[in-house]
Image (cartoon, grey):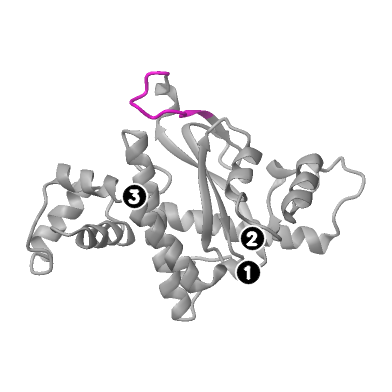
Amino acid sequence: MGSDSEVLTLILAQHALGFPTERRWLRYVQHNLRALFPQQLGQSEFNRRARNLWGALEELRKWVLAQMEVRTETFRLLDSTPVQVRHWRRHGPGHLRLAGAALGYCAAKRETFSGYRLLVLTTLDGVITDWTLIPANADEREGADAVLEDSTNLRVLGDKGFLDGFWQAELQQRQGIVVHTPKRVNQKEPHPPEWEALLNRARCLVETSFAQAKAFLGLERPGARTLWGLGSRLRAKLAALTLLARVNRQAERSPLTIAGFAC
C-alpha cells in the first residue's frame, strides 16, 4: 500500500463492501488480499493517508459523474438526512472537535439527533450529484443555496422544508432554477392530485437513495471523531456510492438496486 492509488483503491473498496471500520477492513486485507497489497500499512498511517486524500476522492467522484453525463439532465431531487456524531443526550459544547455540530430534529423519524444534516441533489433515478453538510439546526434553504450555487436552469423537486415563495422566486430569477414543493393544507390553490403524486414519487426515490447509503455505507453514523475525519469519510462513502451507481447504470440497472428495494 505504498502508492496513493493503492490507498484510494482500499478506501473505496472498504466502503463499497460495507466494512464499518478501518481496523476490520485492514485485518481482512491482511488475511485475504495480501498478494494484491503486499506493503501493509498500520491503521494510524492508513487513516492519516486516507484523510490527506479527501480532495482526490472528491475529484474522482466528479469525474465518474462526468462519465455518466448526469449534468445534462434537467430535473433534480433535493432533500437532507441526519448525520449523527453522538447520542443527543450527550450533546455538549465540548464534543470532541466537531465544529458546527448541533442538536436538530428529524421529522421523518420524529427524533432529536446531535450532529449535522447532509443535504444532497440527486438525479431522478437516485444518483447523488451535489452535496453539502450543514449543522443539524441550520435552515435547509441555506444548504440548498450551497448545493445549487454552480447550477443553472434546473427543475428541482423538494419537500415542504423548501417552501418559501420569496426564496424560490429569487433563485429562479438569479439562476433559472425552479423549485417545486408540495403545498400546505391551508394554502388556497393546492396542486392537482397528479402533481402531488409526482412529488411523492420523487421523495420516495431520494429516500431510497439515502436508505441505500445508510444500509451499505453507514452514512448516518460515520463514527468520525474530528471534523476533518468526518469530511474525509463522507467523501469516501459518496465516492464509493457514485462508483456503484455507475456500475449499475452500465449494466442497465437502476443505481438503487444494491439497496435491495426500490420505489
Dot 1 amino acid type = Glu
For residue 223, say whether it is visible: no
Disc number at residue 98? Answer: none
Q: Quadrant of the N terminus?
A: bottom left
Q: Residues within 10 Å of mark 3 (few under 14, many from 20)?
A: many
- CA distance for labels 3 and 1: 27 Å
Q: What stretch of residues is rendered in magenta?
A: 93-103
Lateral position of residue 236 relative to residue 260, left or right: left
Name the residue nearer the viewer: 32 or 58. Answer: 58
Q: Residues within 10 Å of mark 2 (few under 14, many from 20)?
A: many
Q: In the rendered view, would you say 144 is above or below 194?
A: above
- CA distance for labels 2 and 3: 25 Å
Q: Which residue is mark 1?
A: 73
Q: In the rendered view, would you say 179 is above or below 114?
A: below
| Mark closer to the observer (2, 3) | 3
Name the residue nearer the viewer: 132 or 159. Answer: 132
Q: Residue at x 39, y 51 (%)?
A: 235
Provide residue 215's location: percent of width, then percent of height: 41, 54
Q: Which residue is mark 2?
A: 76
Q: Residue at x 58, y 66 (%)?
A: 71
| Mark closer to the observer (1, 2) | 1
Lateral position of residue 24 relative to residue 66, left or right: left
For residue 49, say whether it is visible: yes
Is label 3 in contact with label 1 (beta carbons under 8 Å)?
Answer: no
